[in-house]
Amino acid sequence: MTSFDDKTTRIRTSAELGKLVKQVRQDQSLLQSDIAGLAGTGNRFIVDLERGKPTLQLQKVLDTLDLMGLEVIIQRKGQSNGHS
């Protein structure tokens, strides 16, 4: 995965989300422990998120994404929002 910018990225698996979170964290020059501290979670949660663990608590995932400047947008398949 290349550097993440302001583009829309299609995520279909927890592993893809984990890779994106890791890339964004690295792009922001943050350690896993930095994100864990800011999000008020344990370091293990961030490790599991980046590894794509599919059973993580959704609200904690959403809160962590928000903290990192990311948001989840839901749309019907096949519709385009002007991004790829």
Image: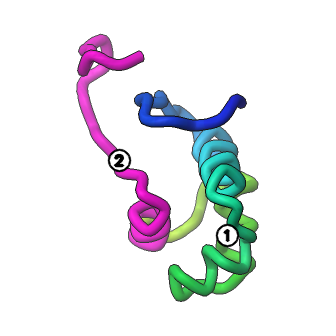
Instruction: State whether residue 21 is above or below residue 9.
Output: below
- 47 within the magenta span: no
Query: Which of the 4 quarters of the picture holds residue 20?
Result: top right
* Rendered location of residue 60, percent (x, y): 46, 73
* Rendered location of residue 84, percent (x, y): 42, 16
Instruction: State whether residue 70 is above or below residue 36.
Output: above
Tag shown at residue 19: none
Q: Residue at x 35, y 19 (%)?
A: 83
Which residue is tagged 1?
46
Tell me if mark 1 has few (under 14), some (14-19) or many (20+) residues whose alpha carbon lies within 10 angstroms of its own.
many
Magenta segment range?
A: 59-84
* Rendered location of residue 53, percent (x, y): 68, 57
Task: Give the mark nearer the N terminus: 1 vs 2.
Answer: 1
* Rendered location of residue 56, percent (x, y): 57, 66
Which residue is tagged 2?
72
Q: Amino acid at mark 2?
A: Val
Q: Residue at x 48, y 68 (%)?
A: 64
Q: Residue at x 47, y 28 (%)?
A: 10
- 68 within the magenta span: yes
> Which of 71 and 61 lies nearest the eye of the viewer?
71
